[in-house]
Image: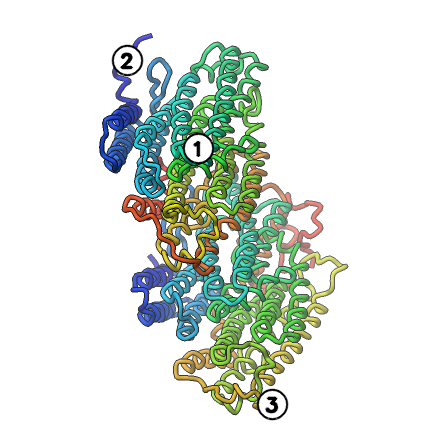
Amino acid sequence: MTFASGDLLYIAPFLVLALSGILLVLAEAFYTGKDRTALAGLTVAGALSSTVVSVALYRHLGATESRLLFTEMLVADRTGYVLTALFGVVAALAALLAPAHQRVHGWVVGEYYGILLLAASGMVLLAQAANLATVFLGVETMSIGVYVMTAMRRRSKRGNEAAMKYFLMGAFSTAFLLYGMALVYGAIGTTSLVQIQGRLVSGNLGLLTVGTFMMVAAFAFKIAAVPFHMWAPDAYEGAPTPVTAFMAAAVKAAAFAAMMRMFGQYMGGDRLPYGVIGWASPMVVLAAITITVGNIAAIRQDNIKRMLAYSSISHAGVLLVGLCAMGLGSASGKPALIYYLISYSLTTMGAFAVVAYVGSKDQERLDIDDWAGLATRHPGAALAMTLCLLSLGGMPPTGGFFAKFYVFKSAMDAQDQQLLWLTAIGVINSAISIYYYLRIVTTMYFKDPRGEIAPTRSAALAFVMVACPLVILEMGLFPNWWLSL
Amino acid sequence: MNPGAWVLPLILGLPLLGALFAMCTPRGEHTLARGIGIATSAITFLVSLFALAYFDKSAAGYQLVTDAAWIPSVGVRFKTGIDGITLWLVLLTTFLTPVTLLAATKSIDKHVREFVAAMLILETGMLGAFVAVDAFLFYVMWEVMLIPMYLLIGIWGGQRRIYASIKFVIFTMVGSLLMLVAIFYVYVSYAEVTGVYTTDLEKLQTLVLPHQAQVWCFAAFALAFAIKIPLFPLHTWLPDAHVEAPTPGSVILAGVLLKLGIFGFIRWAMPLFPYGASVLAPYIAILAVIGIVYGALVAYAQDDVKKLVAYSSVSHLGFCALGLFALTPAGIEGSIYAMLSHGLTTGGLFLGIGMLYERRHTRRLAEYGGLWKQMPVFAGLYLVIVMGSAGLPALSGFVGEFLTLFGTFNAGDTFPEGYPTYLPKPRLLGAIAATGVVVGAIYLLFMFQKVFFGPLDKSRNGQLADLSGREKAVFIPIVILIFVMGIFPRPFLKRMEPSVNAFLGAYHAKLAEGDGPARLLSEQFGSRSRRAIERIRRGGASPDALPSPDTEPAGAGAPGQLAPRGQP
């Protein structure tokens, strides 16, 4: 085993995030001022420089080039760098949401920023993982960071409950993951995904199947697929809004990045997923019930964060459709997933930014009725939220529509009977979802305001609220460039 | 680039630009926002007249085509074009929008700039749906219409506006999403056959799907369009939406939006899936007839004027659907003509109701009476519109109704091939539908009588002022057009004719392709459709316009219940 120092170049996004994360944690220890805004600035700088590095590496690599790093521990390819760039951007957005929210809601915790970047570094590992060990490492680095962030409002009972639930469920899922990996290792004798791919057919089928199913279940926990979703609404509700946004956007995207690598790329292709190790058969069922249950549960929510939590569950279902399509050999599966992840992440960040904006001191205004008449008093915020909701609901001309269009197209490309049904289920669910997304729009536009809303004013927050809807509009109108990524 | 290709992109872009400008005006500047709205939509109308000027009336295909790459990686193009059918619908849209905006200056007094922006975005959506020759573009535009209409009802609507707006959106969404699945199916099937992904309608039309798939896909499209028309029993959203919508919303809804349902059948569902259309056509025609009679009877029973007109729309749009599914040239031309006429007359009816409501704040018939003495100008102009709607000869409604009924009666032998014997004959359908004309005249005159005749016995009606100059400016163009369309139908019909014949020819020729796996049109298609068009021109749209046995493709021998028979 040799250490190739040249490989360090290809993990530069990880290094940038990890180092700046450590630096920020240290800085917090020595920081004397009360205001932590400076830390937020540093975080944005660190996150964005990792994005810049990712973009540079993306351009440095050829379109189909794929380099294995550190004796098949990590892999460098364009798909990975698109996703690492996305994680950098989402981390930067999450950092922008924080200062004003911390100030107004009284949870000024400087560690937020350092931990945010460390968690993002775990996500980068997931996007570049080529070995079960790195997948595990990435999952843990990311999750532990997010558990801590969920609990950052120390005095809030809700927050503590959320963090506890999230942590316990997460610990279970990690155990599943580890056990599944151990079984796969037992069956094949290696943890390198590249070699697993080559030896899939020769391994011990029983062990492989059980191992794969356990890994599917573990990731189902992470992406909150039904029936492993119970923690999500509580965790989303209890966590501070910037953390919720980060959880909904980046954690989900990172889990999908890992699944794309493991299932879509290395354990997929041809008809393998249904056959020998069969991860796609449970995944198809998971996708169908996730989309449906997520949507139907969302209809009944009165709390915006819980509604968005259930909506993100149903989005995970749609993403699973894309994953199955990719695994079953649909050529458009991968670009569809990437497009969906980008559009979904930015939309979610935008929507939670508005949630953070609407809340004011001692009053988070999470009840949908609290948003009555928002359009009269704060038309910009209402418009931003409307665009985000329409995108989540898949209405043209937003990115969300095209994301769904492309995922369902890739599912039909796979020419698989089950995926055809999944597409129909997914499309019908879009109609259901419109109902609850429009409920918020209805409240904002059609109902009369009840009392003043003194929103959380902050330039950083406003920037996120303006930038995200604009980008998703651009993505919807001119998706071509995004599809070529 | 063909001459005049700039017209369509321009009329799509102008309203959007206007919407952007309107949103940029300061919040209190209502007059400015209104001015921007009226000016942009009026300019859009003038520009759309260029489409008429550039239009070649003897050609059947798409004209003024713009075709640009939009999303090359999935084969989506920004492709727009008009034919003899869309030309008129486009003009109707661009005509009604400025008129409506002009009429709304008084009734809409809150969130004016948002209102103007919503109306203009709605205009772009409607025009886009009419001129799109690309399935993706069409679907996007179809959905783009939805949100502004939802906002129009929800923000500026009446008491139960929230219920009505949500109902409107949910009904429409459910239909259009199933349509999306069918679009997917066609899109992917085309790629399987040719290896090329495209959403270009002209290319997709060359695909022949297996019969069973055609029935399913047609049903999915038909649901979307039938909700929009609305066909009985999917019409329940319409009275709610109309009653709660503000006047401009009702005008646009009845004037243009409903037409998109019929138009969708002509442009999308029937050319793509002719076999599915031929199987389901009798049932749709029966539903249309039920709608005609039911709508008319329910309209007669209303006390709320707006509801009366809303149900009259159900009845009138039933005529359009019936004429279309009679599948004769006269029926289809009548259907389109009736749509145009309905756009004008119902638009006018709603505008008039809006003006009364602004003065009296009630829509109950019982509250009115004797207004002729008080508002003679209004009464005179309104009489023309009411008569136009009732189908009085020399006014626009007559031509459309006459042609649709004529077409339906003539569909005797042809409607459609293999028409199941247990269903009522087209003549019977036509006869029942004709009673709708009678009831239509009754309820409309009844309404007119209750409002304008009789004693002026309600004291509050005594102070009503007659039309202002602005209101006259709203009504007079409509009334003139109703006369023009009633007296000179020829220029309109002449421009539709080639397109309608080509539509029917292609429909019959594609139907003759028979069952089989998904494939492209056979080589005989061109000659078949030419022959079909030739027969249609000579006056017989009978099914033996269809292929003679020697050209029957070998694979068409599916135990083909409804496969067209060639024997004379």
What amino acid type is highlighted by mark number 3? Answer: Gly
Check if mark 3 and mark 1 are on a common chain: no
Q: Residue at x 33, y 34 (%)?
A: A91
Q: Nearer the viewer, mark 2 or mark 3?
A: 3
For label 3, the residue is B454
Looking at the image, residue B433 sits to the left or right of residue A217; the answer is right
Within-10-Å neighbours for mark 1: few <14, some 14–19, many 20+: many
Asked where in the image residue A98 lies, by quadrant, the reply is top left
Assess disc 2: are there few (<14), some (14-19) or many (≥20) residues with their C-alpha within 10 Å of its C-alpha: few
Q: Amino acid at mark 2?
A: Ala
Q: Can you give x and y, in whole percent of width and height, for residue A189 in the image? A: 48, 9
Residue drawn 46% across the image and 36% down it: A158
Chain of residue at mark 3:
B
Q: Chain of mark 2?
A: A
Q: Quadrant of the C terminus of chain B?
A: bottom right
What kind of element bears circle 1?
helix
Residue tagged 1: A252
Q: Is residue A178 found left or right of B390 in the rendered image?
A: left
Quote the CA–CA distance across marks 1 and 2. Answer: 32 Å
Query: Which residue is outermost to the right?
Result: B422
Secondary structure found at label 3: loop
Residue A171 placement (x, y as % from top left): 48, 23
Q: Residue furthest top?
A: A1
Res B500 seen here = no
What residue would you read off at disc 2? A4
Q: Position of residue B271 (x, y in %)?
A: 55, 55
